[in-house]
Image: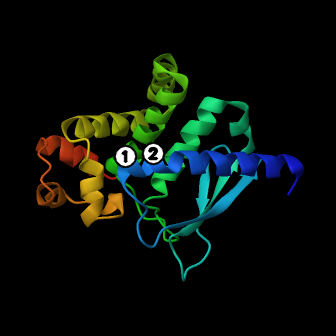
Amino acid sequence: MSQTELTQVEKLEKLRTAWLPAVEFLFGTPAESAEFKGFTVSEDIAKPIPHFGDASQPFHYTLQIPARSFSNEVMLLADLIQEMTRGLYPVGIDAKDTNALSEGAAIYGAVAAVKQVFGEQTVDSYLNALREQGFAYYDAFSYVSVLLTEDPQAIKKLREIKPFLYEVERSDFDAVGIEIDRRIKDILLMKFRL
């Protein structure tokens, strides 16, 4: 690993250490079998990629971050928070399908962090770019925002009975006392597609 990559990994580790309490405050602690094993940096990828390499520990992962993320502090923070949130309920070595709820929560976490560090104007720019370039993510974020406006603890409540957010079913909302329109539930539980 080059000195540049070592410096980048060190920066990622510091950011993760600083932001993990906030991510856990919003969404709860990692699923019991989930374990983050470290970062790598690559010139060859465009977006962060979790790597699950051991079938005997299917939810242990490393996170590969694109080197180009380091040229934009907003995107670096947004990418990192999204992956930290997904790391609470990783898809694992079998790459489970996700739903709008799990993807929207990841974007929600990123938006909250970007707003805190860079302000409202930067959040507006980020959301406008997301709406134009990744509408499915924007849409999922919007529905998670509605859910968390109705019940700020909703994600934590759901994860208490289903630690892997993409496994949540409609009946789980009732089981934890979340009252939200059936159509919103249905949209949140739809298989996520780009």
Decide: marks 2, 1 in contact (CB < 8 A)? Answer: yes
Q: Which residue is mark 1?
A: 26
Outermost residue, top side = 121
Under circle 1, the secondary element is helix
Locate the N terminus by quadrant.
Answer: bottom right
Residue 135 at x, y percent in the picture: 42, 33
Looking at the rendered structure, the kind of residue marked 2 is Ala
Residue at left offset 15%, top offset 49%? 178
Instruction: Please tell me how crowded label 1 is: few (under 14), some (14-19), or many (20+) other residues with Cα within 10 Å.
Output: many
Q: Is residue 165 left or right of residue 74?
A: left
- Using the image, determine if residue 35 lies above or below residue 122: below
Q: Is residue 157 left or right of residue 48?
A: left
Residue 131 at x, y percent in the picture: 44, 27
- Asked which quadrant contains residue 70, the reply is top right
Residue 41 at x, y percent in the picture: 74, 51
Under circle 2, the secondary element is helix
Residue 99 at x, y percent in the picture: 34, 52
Any part of residue 185 in sight = yes
Q: Is residue 117 left or right of residue 166?
A: right
Outermost residue, right side = 2
